[in-house]
Amino acid sequence: MEPTIYLFFEGNCLEAMTHYAEVLGGQITDVSRNGDAPDPESRMPGGDNLVLNMAMTLGSATVMASDGVGEMYEKPQGFRVAISPLSLAEFDRVHAALAKDARSVEMPAGETFWAERFSMFTDRYGTPWMLNFDGNKAPGGA
């Protein structure tokens, strides 16, 4: 059994998930829009282009998402999507792409006692991220 990350967005799910797929090397495998629902009762309030459900594969993981507009949307809290790029250059590339226009930066990219590079931020779409590159601080060295 593996957990699946499920993200909610304020009407920009397709844009956000497409960005994540491009930056992280994922593949969008399914998109169901509001307009695809068989009847009006199966739709959420809002336009036909809102995303009811979307799936992306990222390595062996699946990340799913949808739009949650109005009262259906709650600001993410109490978690972060954590990723560990395999090199310092990859960390810097991913960080630059995801942290661009960030809503907040809790820890700017920098060295810590446990990692060559670490950062925590909430991106422009509202997703809270934690990036970590152990490098030579990994148990046993890099």
Image: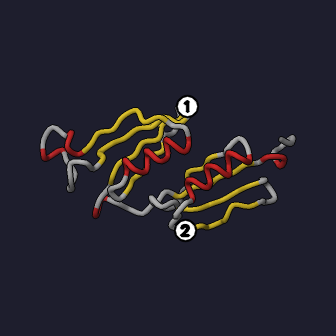
Residue 5 to residue 96: above or below? above
Q: Position of residue 43 (x, y in %)?
A: 19, 47
Residue 81 to residue 31: above or below? below
Amino acid carrying label 1: it is Ser
At x 52%, y 32%, the residue is 1
In the rendered structure, the answer to whether residue 58 lies left or right of residue 10 reads: right
Q: Position of residue 72 (x, y in %)?
A: 30, 59
Q: Are marks 1 and 2 in contact (CB under 8 Å)?
A: no
Which quadrant of the view contains residue 35?
A: top left
Label 2 residue SS: strand
Q: Nearer the viewer, residue 79 or 120?
A: 120
In the rendered structure, the answer to whether residue 127 lies left or right of residue 71 reads: right
Which quadrant of the view contains residue 96?
A: bottom right
At x 86%, y 42%, the residue is 141
Q: Which residue is mark 2?
A: 104
Most extreme residue toward the right, as rendered?
A: 140
At x 44%, y 58%, the residue is 125
Count neighbours of disc 2 (C-alpha within 10 A) and say few if under 14, some if 14 to 19, many if 20 or more: some
Q: Which residue is mark 1?
A: 60
At x 18%, y 44%, the residue is 42
The quadrant of the image that shows the C terminus is top right
Please give the count of numbered marks on the rendered protein: 2
In the rendered structure, the answer to whether residue 110 lies left or right of residue 64 reads: right
Amino acid carrying label 2: it is Ser
